[in-house]
Image (cartoon, rainbow, N blue to C red):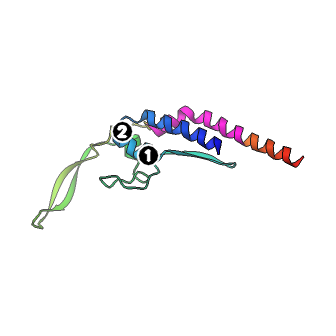
């Protein structure tokens, strides 16, 4: 479908242009795609279900890449090489940028191309109905 390719191409480009780190590209951009049909269309990002090297699954744990996270210390239960259990403090969420209320990558890209994508989709629907009307007459 030509409309899906047009919307998808522009969507992917808009998302890629906003990703500044390799981690953002792996989480948000890798699964960026568009769906378009006669009843609806959607712009999707972070749909990859393949776990990254550290175990993060982008489809389920994308929020840190899009909105950032506050780094903090957490107590972690672990075991030594000899098997002794102990508790240690560990910094978590350091790999993400700081928190923001609105998203950095996909949300920003959607706000930029959203109206254009809706216009393309509506034009596709109008063209399909016009073609169907010509065939029945």
| In this view, 77 is above or below 40 | below
Q: Residue furthest right?
A: 137
Total tally of numbered discs in the picture: 2
Looking at marks 1 and 2 on the same chain, the residue that comes earlier in the sequence is marked by 1
Task: Identify the residue shown where x is 43% and y is 44%.
Answer: 28
| In this view, 47 is above or below 7 | below
Main secondary structure type of the part rendered in magenta: helix
Q: Crowdedness of circle 2 by 10 Å Cα count: few (<14), some, many (20+)? A: some
**Closest to the observer, 80 or 48:** 48
**Closest to the observer, 124 or 99:** 124
Q: Is residue 130 left or right of residue 11?
A: right
**Closest to the observer, 3 or 114:** 3
Position in image of residue 100 (x %, y %) = 39, 37
Circle 2 SS class: loop
What is the quadrant of residue 49 in the picture? bottom left
Do the CB atoms of the residues marked 1 and 2 lie less than 8 Å apart? no
Position in image of residue 127 (x %, y %) = 75, 40
Position in image of residue 110 (x %, y %) = 53, 37
Circle 1 SS class: loop
Q: Crowdedness of circle 1 by 10 Å Cα count: few (<14), some, many (20+)? A: some
Disc marking residue 30 = 1
């Amino acid at each position: 479908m030509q409309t899906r390719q047009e919307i998808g191409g522009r969507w992917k480009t808009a998302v890629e242009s906003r990703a500044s780190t390799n981690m953002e590209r792996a989480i948000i951009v890798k699964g960026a795609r568009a769906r378009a049909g006669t009843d609806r269309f959607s712009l999707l990002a972070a749909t990859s279900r393949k776990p990254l090297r550290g175990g993060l699954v982008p489809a389920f744990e994308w929020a840190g890449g899009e909105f950032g996270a506050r780094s903090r210390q957490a107590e972690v239960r672990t075991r030594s090489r000899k098997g002794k259990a102990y508790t240690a403090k560990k910094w978590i969420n350091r790999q993400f940028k700081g928190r923001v209320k609105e998203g950095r990558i996909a949300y920003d890209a959607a706000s930029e191309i959203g109206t254009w994508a809706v216009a393309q989709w509506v034009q596709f629907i109008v063209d399909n109905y016009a073609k169907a009307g010509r065939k029945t007459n």
